[in-house]
Image (spheres, rainbow, N blue to C red):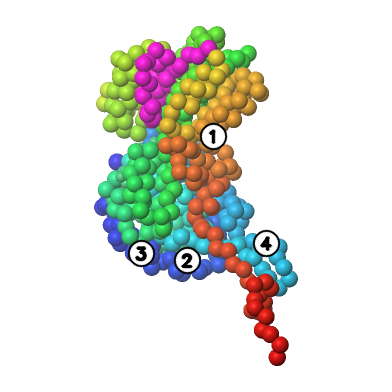
């Protein structure tokens, strides 16, 4: 445990945010951007410190924690750019003397609720666009990564963000529920599991007056078709399924492989998975992956692997737990082709389910056989096959010959189905942090009714 303290008080945090909001919203945009830039500068000077804390609290390798800090800093630049490009003040060409102005206003007080797996970069991806647009934020980090959450909020204070503009509210589901249900908030920006997202969606069912952003989980397919480079295919598969110990929303969960190349592909993936180093974040040689977030997660994943095995799955590589009392897991690969009913759930860890198919149409059908829709991909195949997959794929990210993980910071990021509610984050986060106000403006009230008036008559 790297952080200890009291549970947050939702009432107080929201009060503080409400009091700070009018002043923050009426500040010049340039002043808000300057504050955000000061925050980025602070974090740059504390780069290694933050990366170390992320690695210690999540267990992810230090190189990966550094990547997260890089990603976070890049997100701040993108947020400034995307506000200007998507939600700044614009004028439409109009008649002489008349203007049509499109401006955007902030919502007010937004609650940001985030998961454990990228405890710094995911919150920043919501908080910074929200602040630039003129909102105040109450931030509830994951109860599994409170120290990183606190670190970010302390860095805001060091960057002299005015009191109350961002406040933290520590706690788990219960505090999240209190914040989300509070009358005085204007919306929730959420990233986390589909289960929690659906809870929030229900909570907001009769509140169309509040903004709700849901970035949720996935049961992501990766199709492998003909390719001369089986080794590269295996590398992309391992990166997609096992980087971050499989704790990535866009990780490949289901590998759909053509029967004719099945043995070669799986042989290579298995050999590669056997070589992946799994160890503590700072160990030498550098590990490919660390533990999953905690023992409960490791227990749940172990049970899931057993469930697949006892319900028609055929293990290709057993998932094991080398140290029983610690949450390290080795990558598990299991063929579920013969399973009569494959569970459509997200297994948030290093488990790859494999399905053998013979036709490309069948591959697309299996890929879409999910209620989720975050990422999908094709490795190998032809340009026509990629077009076909792209056109039919129900997902917000569709890649060709690239890993399913590793979002491009300058692009929008979000899913459909049970993966999101059509409010993508990343470059499009600006869109949900402000609402448009359209104004027709003329300097003088000059007007006439041209048609439909009775004549006044002579005299
Ligand atoms: P989680 O849903 O358990 O928790 C996420 C956050 O919600 C935490 O802060 C938690 O305290 C809070 N919470 C839990 N129940 C709540 C409730 N009833 N009301 C309000 N808040 C509540 O998710 P997790 O296990 O921390 O994270 C992993 C999940 O996040 C995976 O499903 C993963 O796919 C998803 N994720 C999605 C994206 C994306 O961009 N789509 C990115 C990263 C992670």
Q: Are marks 4 and 2 in contact (CB under 8 Å)?
A: no
Give the labeled residue for mark 4. 92
Give the x, y percent position of residue 218.
Answer: 43, 32
> Relative to 365, is 249 above or below?
below
Give the labeled residue for mark 1. 397
Sequence-first disc among 3 and 2: 3
Q: Identify the magenta region.
A: 329-358
Q: Find residue 24 and name its label.
A: 2
The N terminus: image quadrant: top left
Sequence-first disc among 1 and 4: 4
Q: Secondary structure at mark 1?
A: strand
Q: Are marks 3 and 2 in contact (CB under 8 Å)?
A: no
Q: Residues within 10 Å of mark 3 (few under 14, many from 20)?
A: many
Q: Comparing marks 4 and 3, which lies closer to the viewer?
A: 4
- How far apart are the two marked residues, 1 and 2, measured between alpha carbons? 35 Å
Q: State yes or no: Cβ of the residue under disc 2 lies below 8 Å from any atom of ligand 1.
A: no
Give the x, y percent position of residue 317.
Answer: 40, 14
Give the labeled residue for mark 3. 16
Q: Are marks 3 and 1 in contact (CB under 8 Å)?
A: no
Question: What's the residue at 44%, 56% (across, down)?
Answer: 156
Question: Could you tell me what secondary structure mostly forms the magenta stretch?
Answer: loop
Q: Comparing marks 1 and 2, which lies closer to the viewer?
A: 1
Q: Are marks 1 and 2 in contact (CB under 8 Å)?
A: no
């Amino acid at each position: 445990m790297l952080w200890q303290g009291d549970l947050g008080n939702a009432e107080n945090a929201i009060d503080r945010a409400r009091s700070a909001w009018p002043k923050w919203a009426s500040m010049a945009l340039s002043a808000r951007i300057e504050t955000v830039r000061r925050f980025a500068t602070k974090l740059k000077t504390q780069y290694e410190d933050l990366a170390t804390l992320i690695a210690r609290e999540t267990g992810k390798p230090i190189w990966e924690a550094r990547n997260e800090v890089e990603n976070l800093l890049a997100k701040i630049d993108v947020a400034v750019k995307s506000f200007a490009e998507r939600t700044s003040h614009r004028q439409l060409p109009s008649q002489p003397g008349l203007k049509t102005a499109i401006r955007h206003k902030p919502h007010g007080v937004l609650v940001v609720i985030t998961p454990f797996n990228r405890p710094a970069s995911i919150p920043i991806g919501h908080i910074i666009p929200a602040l630039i647009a003129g909102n105040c934020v109450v931030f509830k980090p994951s109860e599994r990564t409170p120290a990183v959450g606190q670190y970010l909020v302390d860095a805001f204070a060091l960057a002299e963000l005015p009191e109350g503009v961002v406040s933290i509210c520590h706690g788990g589901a219960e505090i999240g529920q209190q914040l989300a249900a509070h009358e005085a908030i204007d919306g929730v920006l959420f990233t986390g599991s589909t289960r929690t997202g659906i809870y929030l969606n229900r909570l907001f069912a009769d509140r169309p007056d509040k903004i709700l952003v849901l970035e949720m989980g996935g049961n992501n397919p990766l199709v492998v078709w003909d390719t001369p480079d089986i080794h590269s295919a295996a590398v992309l598969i391992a990166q997609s399924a096992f980087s971050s110990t499989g704790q990535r929303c866009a990780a490949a969960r289901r590998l759909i492989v053509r029967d004719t190349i099945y043995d070669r592909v799986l042989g290579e993936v298995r050999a590669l998975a056997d070589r992946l180093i799994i160890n503590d974040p700072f160990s030498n040689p550098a590990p490919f992956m660390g533990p999953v977030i905690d023992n409960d997660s490791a227990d749940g994943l172990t049970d899931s692997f057993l469930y697949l095995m006892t319900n028609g799955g055929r293990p290709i590589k057993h998932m094991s737990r080398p140290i029983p009392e610690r949450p390290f897991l080795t990558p598990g690969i299991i063929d579920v082709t013969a399973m009569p009913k494959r569970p459509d759930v997200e297994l948030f860890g290093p488990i790859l389910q494999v399905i053998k198919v013979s036709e490309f149409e069948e591959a697309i059908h299996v890929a879409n056989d999910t209620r989720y829709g975050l990422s999908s991909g094709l490795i190998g195949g032809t340009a026509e096959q990629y077009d076909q997959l792209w056109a039919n794929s129900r997902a917000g990210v569709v890649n060709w010959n690239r890993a399913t993980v590793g979002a491009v910071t300058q692009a929008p990021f979000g899913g459909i189905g049970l993966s999101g509610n059509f409010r993508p984050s990343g470059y499009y986060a600006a869109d949900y942090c402000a609402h448009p106000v359209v104004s027709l403006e003329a300097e003088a009230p000059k007007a006439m009714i041209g048609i439909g008036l009775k004549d006044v008559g002579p005299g």
